[in-house]
Image (tube, grey):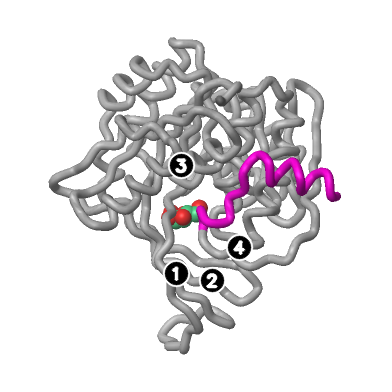
Amino acid sequence: MPTSLPVLVAGAINTDLVATMSSAPGPGETITATTFAIHAGGKGANQAVAAARSGTKVTMVGAIGEDDFGTARLRDLEREGIETTWVRRSSTAASGVALILVEDHGENRIAYVPGATTTIGSDHCVRALQAVRPGIVLATNELPQKSLGALFAEARRLGATVILNATPDPERAVELLGLVDIVIVNAGEAARILAAGDDAGDDLEPHGAIEAVRAFGPGTVIITLGADGVVGNERDTAFAHPAPAVPVVDTTGAGDTFCGAFAASLGSESSISEAARYGVLASALSVTRAGAQAGIPTRQQVTMFAEGL
Ligand code: RIB
């Protein structure tokens, strides 16, 4: 039985069409790729799976189309024990799809078509929150801006902790940050938020960027640094958690794994810093396997990995 605070995750549910290759083609170039695979993906769904595998009760808010990809993704979420009552099926939009190129060293390039995710309205988000009453709301920028605003305002009213992984299009987060408790971004996204907010943040080192983004409202800012782990703050104390070295197969979904595992850990009475450390370990394990969701570890796997370090 889960012992942590229930988490409501709002974001995209995609099908990832993944080709692997030695190096991605440049403009106008055709290259011969090595493998092709279809995986479950979507930042929202990946984060929901990461939180569920870390042992917390998860409700997904998202949308899919009336197509085979949507049906398959819904079954995947249900298999993880994720509550899907608030995943709506659109009769007009197709399920979200991402075209992903993965290079041999694990780096990826992604083009994402949101499809049905754009049909999630404010009412749907507010009704889901009122029905579920989560302790934690974890969202990405994948939902329409207005719906995210309504989701966060209602979450605040109900006393839930709001975590925003401000991607894709981090500029969109500027208007929302006043309603967010914890924002999670990579270094490039932090700089784009600061530039959009008229703060020249491009050349700030990570701790400077954290303080600059905090000025927009969130009490905590966590910056993910890929293979270097994360830096962040807990009230006025900075923390840094380097990532352990692992053999990298596919980095797709590594940030999502961090966010979902972090949210689940935060809800089981960890401090923000401890939860971030747990998220780093889960994320490191996730890159050792292909596919966004296939490599997401369970709490038991993370614990065993930590013991072996
Ligand atoms: O963060 C990785 C995810 O982003 C993929 O699963 C893909 O669906 C894209 O949207």
> How far apart are the two marked residues, 4 and 1, measured between alpha carbons?
13 Å
The amino acid at mark 3 is: Glu
**What kind of residue is marked 1?**
Val
Q: Which amino acid does label 2 sit on?
A: Val
Mark 3 vs mark 2: give the one in front: 3
Q: Residue at x 40, y 40 (%)?
A: 11
Compare marks 4 and 3 and give the one earlier in the sequence. 3
Residue position for label 1: 18
Q: In the image, 250: left or right of 59?
A: right
For disc 2, the marked residue is: 102
Task: From the top left corner, tell me how far across and down residue 117 is, in percent.
Answer: 30, 44
266 in relation to 259, above or below:
above
Q: Badge 4 local density, few (<14 within 10 Å), some, or many (20+)?
A: some
Q: Nearer the viewer, residue 263 or 23?
A: 263
**Is residue 300 covered in magenta?**
yes
Who's the residue at 66% across and 49% down the image? 283
Give the spatial CA distance, label 4 vs label 3.
Answer: 18 Å
Q: Mark 1 to mark 2: distance in Å?
A: 7 Å
Residue neighbourhood size for the residue with mark 2, other residues' Cα within 10 Å, grouped as few (<14), some (14–19), many (≥20) = many
Q: Residue furthest right?
A: 309
Residue at (66, 33) in percent of width and height:
221
Where does the magenta region start and end? 292-309
**Residue 162 percent location from the top left of the image:** 52, 24
Tag 2, which secondary structure?
strand
Question: Label 3: which residue?
Answer: 80
Q: In this view, does 96 lie to the left or right of 273?
A: left
Which mark sits nearer the N-terminus, 3 or 1?
1
Of the numbered discs 4 and 1, the one sitting upstream in the chain is 1
Evaluate if marks 3 and 1 touch, with contact meaning CB atoms under 8 Å apart: no
Mark 3–mark 2 distance (CA, rounded to whole Å): 26 Å
